[in-house]
Structures are given as structure tokens and as C-alpha cells.
Amino acid sequence: MNEQTLRTLLQAVQEGDMNIDDMVERMRLLPMESIPSARLDHHRSLRTGMPEAVFGEHKTVAQLIEILSAQLQQPHVVLATRISNDKAEDVCQAVEGLSYHPEARMLTGNENQISDQQGSRAVLLVTAGTSDLPVAEEARVTLQCLGRKVEPIYDAGVAGIHRILAHQKLLQRAPVIVVIAGMEGALPSVVAGMTPAPVIGVPTSIGYGTGAGGFAALLGMLNSCAPGLAVVNIDNGFGAACMAAAITRDLGSRVRD
């Protein structure tokens, strides 16, 4: 249930196209539906503007089938993250209406429920290297499912600083920028020093031994001296996308070409 769906239902009752009993029946599963493997939060989109997403890494195929089948019955986009190829194949064979994005490791459904793109400018998505693409793709797919335009700049790390400097006009125009980097995690600091937009840093677990699975990049970003930079957890492309979506939603009519 999202705000637009609720408004449509209330308008139908007001205009006499739906009686109160039918309205009550449609609202019966709001805000929560209990199934054997989960309690689904159908009210989340109405409360927060974002639908409930399924973290699939440690869920079984049977659990994913049950949860996603129930979610597909609701009028909102369906998102499941950290889904392996093998799991995705089994789930998609059992459940119609799902699409798998292998590089992002995500399942999506009900794409017809995606709201119109908000704002005339795209969220800028920047990666330091090609190895960061799985996290970037998780962010990109999430943003698109949340109704946001996305413009990617991939493989623009500080080892070849000219690669990001070549995009200064885009950096100046963007309403918000998601910057994804492993190794020492320097790229978000550089980008934040080149733009008035809020920058969301995403440390990745890419790097050699002392990178410590992304902790070096995380600490580097957290200790940045560049203002306007916030940081999410290691490899959390989904979380960064949700923050970028929230920022652009709040900008609303202030976002202009």
C-alpha cells in the first residue's frame, strides 16, 4: 500500500465507485500480513515512501518463494537483495513476474508500480573501479525501482584523477551523488570537494590485505575532511540508494535543470 493507492481507494469511495465494505476488505492487510516465514510490512511504503525490501542472502529458496509471492500481490514494487544466481533461478521458476539482475544480485517485480521519475536531474552514481560494479549495480537497480533517474560514471578512481575531473559539469549539476570505492576509499573525499551536492560514500570490500575487507575504505571515508559527505556501511549499495532517494524526494520541486 502506498500513498497513491490509498488516495485512489478513498476517491473511489467518495465518488461512489466502491462501497465501504470493499474498502475495508482492501485495507484488511494494512499494515501487516503474517505468513509462516515472515511478517510483511505493507504499510512501510505509506509511512516512509519506500517499500519493504527483502534481504535474501541467508533466506532459503522456499522462504523467498513464500515472501515474494505475497509481496507481488501488493500494489508496490518488489525488491530482494543479495540473491545468488542459483537461488534466483529456482525462485523465478516457481514465481512468475520476477526479474533477476545478476550483477546487482537482486530480484525485482511489479515494475509497473514504479512511481514517475522525481526531479528532472539524475542521481549521479560514481565508482572508483570496475571491481566496485556489483555494489554500484545494487544501488542503480534500487534507485530505478524507487523511481529515480540514474547517471553512472564508472571506473573513475583517484589513481587516474583526470577521469573524475573530466566530469566536473555533471558533478556540479547533480542533486545528490553516490560514490562507491574500495582500497583506501579516497574518491568520495575528492568528489565532495568538487560539488555543492550531498555526497554518499559507500566503502567496498575491494582491496589487498590491509584493506581488511573494506574497513580501511570505511575509516578513510569517515575521517574525510570534505564537508557534505556521509557514509553508509561496507558494500551497502541498497542503503546508499535509499538515502539518495530520500534526499531527492525531500528536494521535491526545488530540483530544477
Image (cartoon, helix red, strand yellow):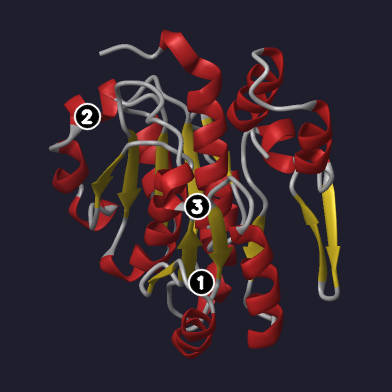
In-image side of 187 versus 69 (left or right): left
| Spatial CA span between label 1 and label 2 | 30 Å
Give the residue pinned by disc 1: 211
Residue 199 image position (x, y, % from top left)? 46, 34
The reply, left or right, for residue 8 in relation to residue 253 is right
> For this rendering, which residue is in front, 89 or 57?
89
Q: Describe the element under mark 1 as helix, strand or loop.
A: helix
Q: Are marks 3 and 2 in contact (CB under 8 Å)?
A: no
Q: Name the residue under label 2.
A: 170
Q: Which mark is residue 145?
A: none
Sequence-wise first label, 1 or 2: 2
Out of 6 and 172, give the one closest to the viewer.
Answer: 6
Q: Which residue is drawn at 65% across and 59% down?
A: 71
Instruction: Report whether 125 appears left or right of 153.
Output: right
Residue 169, quarter of the rendered image = top left
Residue lying at 63% horizontally and 78% vertically, measured from the top left: 65
Give how far apart the Cα atoms at labels 3 and 1 are.
Answer: 14 Å
The answer, for residue 169, to whether it is visible in the render is yes
> Callout 3 environment at 10 Å: few (<14), some (14 to 19), or many (20+)?
many
Residue type (three-letter) at the residue carrying disc 2: Leu
In the rendered image, residue 238, in percent from the top left (x then y), is placed at: 54, 54
Q: Say which label, 3 or 1, has the lower sequence index.
A: 3
Q: Nearer the viewer, residue 23 or 248?
A: 23
Q: Residues within 10 Å of mark 2 (few under 14, many from 20)?
A: some
